[in-house]
Amino acid sequence: MPLFFLLVGVLLIIVAVNDKMGELSGLISDDFKSSAGVPGFHIWIAAIFVTGALGYIKDLRPVANAFLVLIVVSLVLSNRGFFTKFNSALEGVS
């Protein structure tokens, strides 16, 4: 967890030095907005949180693990163009 906060801090410093805070906040807010009847990312966060919380109950742990796998598969295979966006991001890097 400390590594996560360290990476977020480094990211915020880099964004601030490059004077791109407006762009970053716009990108983040677009992720959480609903558009064209498709729920935003906050629905996925809630689903992962509730399923993870159920995993703390010992008897429900196998069910929670199965639901977490289902959520990850749904995120990857949803009709939002994951693979095309992933490929375009990789092409932009090289």
Image (tube, grey):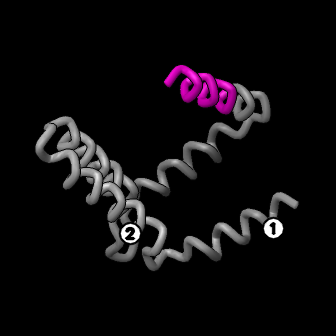
Label 1 near label 2: C-beta < 8 Å?
no
Of the 4 image quadrants, the one containing the C terminus is: bottom right
Q: Is residue 12 above or below residue 37?
A: above
Query: Percent position (x, y) of residue 23?
Result: 64, 47
| Amino acid of disc 2 | Ser
Residue 18 is drawn in which quadrant?
top right
Q: Magenta segment, principal secondary structure?
A: helix
Q: Nearer the viewer, residue 42 or 64?
A: 64
Q: Label 1 neighbourhood size at 10 Å, few (<14), some (14-19), many (20+)?
A: few
Question: What residue sits right under mark 2 in the picture?
Answer: 74
Question: For the residue carrying disc 2, how many other residues have a C-alpha within 10 Å: few (<14), some (14-19), or many (20+)?
Answer: few
Q: Residue furthest right?
A: 94
Tell me residue 1's x, y (percent).
49, 25
Q: Residue furthest left?
A: 59
Q: Residue at x 70, y 25 (%)?
A: 13
Dot 1 lies on which element? helix
Using the numbered discs, state the Cα–Cα distance from disc 2 to disc 1 in whole angstroms: 24 Å
* Residue 57 image point, x, y percent: 14, 38
First to last magenta residue range: 1-12
Q: Residue at x 81, y 67 (%)?
A: 91
Q: Position of residue 52 (x, y in %)?
A: 27, 43
Q: In the image, what residue type sits under mark 1?
A: Glu
- Report helix, strand or loop for mark 2: helix
- Number of marks in the rendered image: 2
Instruction: Determine which residue is flagged by label 1.
Output: 91
